[in-house]
Image (tube, rainbow, N blue to C red):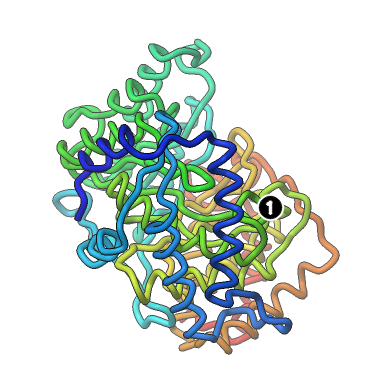
Amino acid sequence: MLSLLDIAERTQTGPKVTEMDWDMGLFRKMTELTQRYAIRAPQDIDWFNTDDDLAARAFQAGVDFLSEAGVYCLSTGRVVQCTRDEVLTAIREAPDRVEMGEAGDRRVFRQHQVEGREPLNVCPGHHAPFTVDLGPLVVESFARIPRTDFLEGFNFSSVDGREIYGLPMEAYAVRRQMDYLRAGICKAGRPGLAIVLYPINTRIGALLAALDPDYGLRRTDGMLLSVLPDLKMEHDLLTAAIVGHEYGLFTLSGSFSIVGGFCGGIEGAIIEGVVKPIVAMLVYRDYINYVGVEDSRGVSLQRIAFQPASWARSLVFQALNTYTHTVSMAWVIPTSGPGTETNLIETAIRSIEAQINGGNLYAIRHSRAQMNAGQTPLEAEWMIEVADATLRAGLDRAGAGRVCRALNARLQGREPEPGHPIGECYDLLRHRPLPEYERTYRTLKDELASLGLDFG
């Protein structure tokens, strides 16, 4: 496999291209590849893709893109080029599991297959904004969820009464994020649980400030180093990857695509969704990726939109879980905020999808999270329950699609809801939802059981 130093050299020697030329070339290349491999959404979309040959073609389109077009480095304005053999060698040699944590909290985070018959791995929360007064308490509550394999950090706008502005304050804020994470997992009785840095800022000084085996990231912890939209990388993240992997960290990437960017429509977004995790593995050694396809209308809270994005997501998961070793995660991001029935219905649909697609469960969060109002532990426990109930019921793509369509029918005519601050719907001290939210949850759970899910 190409080394990270090989990548670093190629960011300095590859063809010089303006960012606009890269963006327009990306659109043309994706359009050409969708035609070359006949990638198009069927007129009558089932909830999940059932055309296995289409998944194989989507994978080949992804390999072709990377070997023919490359990756754009924002830091140097150059294209990092790879041969087809280099791409396929990297795919073949990448691991399909990542060890993390220590002592009694050591876990193995692994790849799962489409319609697989084993429980998913779980990162239950954060990747969201919380004020520092809530930090350790929120961390403790999420760490108390038994299925938690790792826990990602959170961001905040001020620390010690000071606005976080400029690299010195950013580095200091990263150190405090590590304090809150370490204190929270210790209070939960899980001191060895793996934690992951959620970057306050992606400048290298802020990223490396987290490395500290005593008070920050240990060698069994991780860091989020994401490939940017439109298949772009940059030097600070590459530097963090080189130093971090020498130190012993695992790294992960946000590698989903959004319909409507320079990759074009749903078909181009499918190819980008396949390419990005492969790029993340090559340029940052991210073996864990939250992947898929999102509808920009949903991400921007314009509407609750599942199809055709759910179908496209399933196709991307099938391509990656069948033809690569990518340890895929499904990012559960409902358009409605916590404390609402709409949030729980959206979460249920995405959790059923995750189990069927073989996507490990990742950091459920309102897609436009507000301070202290992005997530509660109930949604995390709910997504685990629903995924496990889908597995226990023995549902395949057809059966799961039937349940998803029934739940989606309940959402017709609804608009995304902002949700509630965590203190208005969840008791962090007692680790339980407040009574009204709990009644909503239990009623919906009974409804899902009537649809065929097995909650044991």
Q: Position of residue 295 (x, y in %)?
A: 67, 58
Total marks placed: 1
In the picture as drawn, the residue positioned furthest to the front comes out as 15
* Circle 1: residue type: Ser
Query: In terms of depth relative to the viewer, which is nearer, 421 or 306?
Result: 306
Work out whether 175 lies above or below 12: above
Query: In terms of depth relative to the viewer, which is nearer, 413 or 227?
Result: 227
Q: Position of residue 278 (x, y in %)?
A: 36, 58
The answer to whether residue 277 is visible is yes
Query: In terms of depth relative to the viewer, which is nearer, 131 or 299?
Result: 299
Q: Please tell me which residue is depicted at 60% across the width and 53% down the height of the picture.
A: 27
Q: Badge 1 local density, few (<14 within 10 Å), some, or many (20+)?
A: some
Q: Position of residue 59 (x, y in %)?
A: 43, 71
Q: Please tell me which residue is depicted at 47% across the width and 51% down the height of the picture.
A: 363
Q: Please tell me which residue is depicted at 50% across the width and 11% down the height of the picture.
A: 161
Residue 356 horizontal side relative to residue 321, left or right: right
Viewport quadrant of the N terminus? bottom left
The answer to whether residue 386 is visible is no
Residue 452 horizontal side relative to residue 388, left or right: right
Q: Secondary structure at mark 1?
A: helix
In the picture as drawn, the residue positioned furthest to the right comes out as 413
Q: Please tell me which residue is depicted at 14% across the width and 51% down the height of the picture.
A: 103
Work out whether 335 lies above or below 54: above
Q: Quadrant of residue 422?
A: top right
Q: Position of residue 203 (x, y in %)?
A: 39, 24
Query: In terms of depth relative to the viewer, which is nearer, 36 or 229?
Result: 36
Work out whether 64 lies above or below 200: below
Q: Quadrant of residue 137?
A: top left
Q: Which residue is mark 1?
A: 296
